[in-house]
Image (cartoon, rainbow, N blue to C red):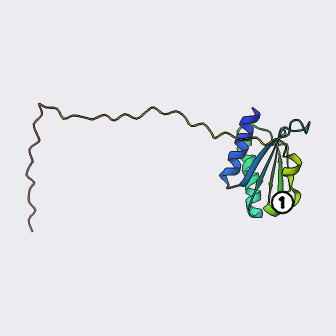
């Protein structure tokens, strides 16, 4: 699977569960073990775990290999290792304390919006009534007796 498609799938999986402050860093020159670091925030332990689980489910469905998951028990910070992408999902307080953006933040990846399929331009077609047709005659309905 292409790295760009994989990082797009990770970001979409995080956005599905309302992950906040999602950033992607290209760390290929800083680390020999992985190429991208994705950092996202969740508001509660339950949301942090749900974000990490959704990343696993979506990428496994696409055929990606999940190398490992750490931190699901306490839910403050969950790390999902996808091999060439490492996803950090954490509380905002934990995120500001550890400040991973300073560590990995040399080159942020700008994600392009997902391309929309091109649609054909809509044309209005007016249906003109035929000139040789007569209007329909109204038929009488039987009356109901009271």
Most distant residue in the bottom direction: 146
Residue drawn 7% across the image and 52% down it:
140
Indicate the secondary structure of the residue bearing disc 1. helix
Q: Quadrant of the N terminus?
A: top right
Residue 64 at x, y = what percent?
Answer: 77, 38
Q: Please identify the quarter of the rendering in which residue 114 is found.
A: top right
User: Between residues 119 and 62, which one lies in front from this camera angle?
Assistant: 119
Q: Quadrant of the C terminus?
A: bottom left
Residue 103 at x, y = what percent?
Answer: 89, 49
- CA neighbours of label 1 inside 10 A, class few (<14), some (14 to 19), many (20+): few
User: Between residues 14 and 64, which one lies in front from this camera angle?
Assistant: 14
Left or right: residue 46 versus residue 132 is right
Residue 26 at x, y = what percent?
Answer: 82, 39
Q: Please identify the quarter of the rendering in which residue 18 is found.
A: bottom right
**Can see residue 125?**
yes
User: Between residues 110 and 135, which one lies in front from this camera angle?
Assistant: 110
The answer to whether residue 71 is above or below residue 129 is: below
User: Between residues 12 and 115, which one lies in front from this camera angle?
Assistant: 115
Residue drawn 8% across the image and 56% down it:
142
- Which residue is tagged 1? 96
Residue drawn 10% across the image and 54% down it:
141
């Amino acid at each position: 699977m292409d790295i760009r498609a994989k990082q797009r799938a990770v970001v979409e999986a995080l956005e599905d569960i309302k992950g906040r402050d999602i950033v992607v860093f290209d760390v290929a020159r800083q680390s020999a073990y992985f190429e991208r670091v994705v950092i996202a925030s969740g508001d509660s332990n339950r949301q942090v775990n749900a974000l990490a689980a959704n990343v696993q489910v979506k990428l496994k469905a696409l055929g990606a290999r999940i190398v490992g998951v750490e931190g699901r028990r306490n839910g403050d910070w969950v790390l999902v290792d996808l091999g060439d992408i490492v996803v950090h999902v954490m509380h905002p307080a934990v995120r500001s304390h550890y400040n991973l953006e300073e560590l990995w933040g040399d080159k942020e990846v700008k994600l392009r919006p997902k391309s929309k399929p091109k649609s054909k331009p809509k044309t209005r077609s007016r249906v003109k009534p035929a000139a040789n047709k007569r209007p329909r005659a109204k038929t009488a309905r039987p009356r109901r007796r009271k």
